[in-house]
Image (cartoon, rainbow, N blue to C red):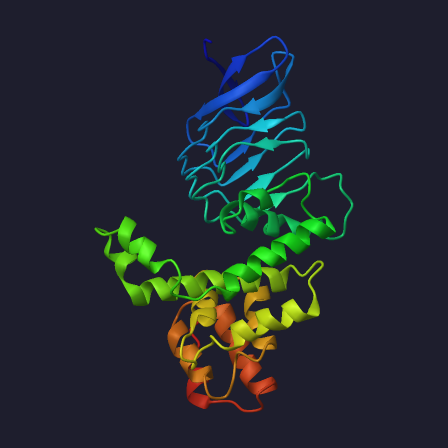
Amino acid sequence: MREKSLETENGSFFFQEYPDRIVITGTAGITRRLVIPEQIAGRPVRGIYKKAFFNRSDLCAVSLPAALLEIGGWAFAHCVNLERVELAGRKVQMGKDPFLGCMRLKEICLPAGETSRDAGQVAPLLAAAAVRMEDPHLFSIAEAGEREWLDKWDARMLVILREPDESGFEKNVLTGEEDYASTDFERFVREKRKAKARLAYLRLLNPCGLSQDIRRELETFLQTHTKGCASEESWQVLWQEHGEEPPYYELFAALGCVTRQNLDGLLRDLQKEHPEMKAYLMRYQAETLGYSDYFSSLSLDL
């Protein structure tokens, strides 16, 4: 079928036209925020073709129409800067790995008309289900936010959290023999623990339906991988990936991951990075830990 094009203020689209529907097949030009229209030529937009937006590094946000019923396989795969997807309906069927490789994806937002007080917390959990949980059955738009879905999300998270850090290394060696990063055992283990820390932070910051037992397990994981421990991945994930996000470093401090023994090391790691977090840690030093270091105060470069 011949492909057609449409220019709008919200993007330039390629599409295929059928008697009862429109299927989007791609886009042209540089588009950071893509708003896919509800209709084209009087027909509802029902589908997004497989690989329609594959490897579009310019995309940061996508708004999908309420009429949409299907997103094809790998439709947004490797859109490495995609952070937010907005849904206008829940009746969307997903092809294989539509968000594969979208590791910056932070939110898949449920329809705006939903009034659930937990909708804002479900959005990041749904995004994680799409890109981090390695369970295609968990990425369900229709079920997202329901009690049973949250229980399944937590069960899968615990499998990941409890898996030995070295698990999977031999498989990586067999499939990545020419890739030094994949065959470096120590790096493999560090990255495995970082992945666990990311999930622990994410769930604690979005605790809808979270049981006390699971909460304690997540808190313990972060506490035992802070600065000064045998491994420091909870601190490394915070510092390297979330240094500009107060909820993350406030949680880190609230869990007791900042101590008299490790605070100087935290500040040394930060150097001139993340001045707001550095200022927060120094206030925490004075107000909560009950002491201050004159020379540390001189190192704050705002």
x then y, percent, for residue 244: 50, 62
The image shows residue 54 at horizontal and vertical percentages of: 42, 32
Residue 137, image quadrant = top right
* Residue at the far bottom in the pictured view: 291
Q: Report the front residue among 47 and 13.
A: 47
User: Residue 260 location, x and y as percent?
Assistant: 50, 88
Q: Quadrant of the C terminus?
A: bottom left
Q: Against 60, is 216 above or below?
A: below
Viewer-proximal residue among 61 and 255: 255
- Relative image position of residue 215 (x, y in whole percent): 64, 69
Residue sitting at x 46%, y 44%: 102
Q: Residue at x 28, y 55 (%)?
A: 173
Answer with the quarter of the image where residue 296 lies.
Answer: bottom left
Q: In the picture shown, does residue 44 fall above or below 183?
A: above
Asked whether residue 244 is in view, the answer is no
Residue drawn at (57%, 88%), measured in percent from left and top? 289
Given the current orientation, which residue lies at the most extreme left position? 178
Residue 134 versus residue 25: which sits nearer the camera? 134
Residue at left 60%, top 61%?
A: 203
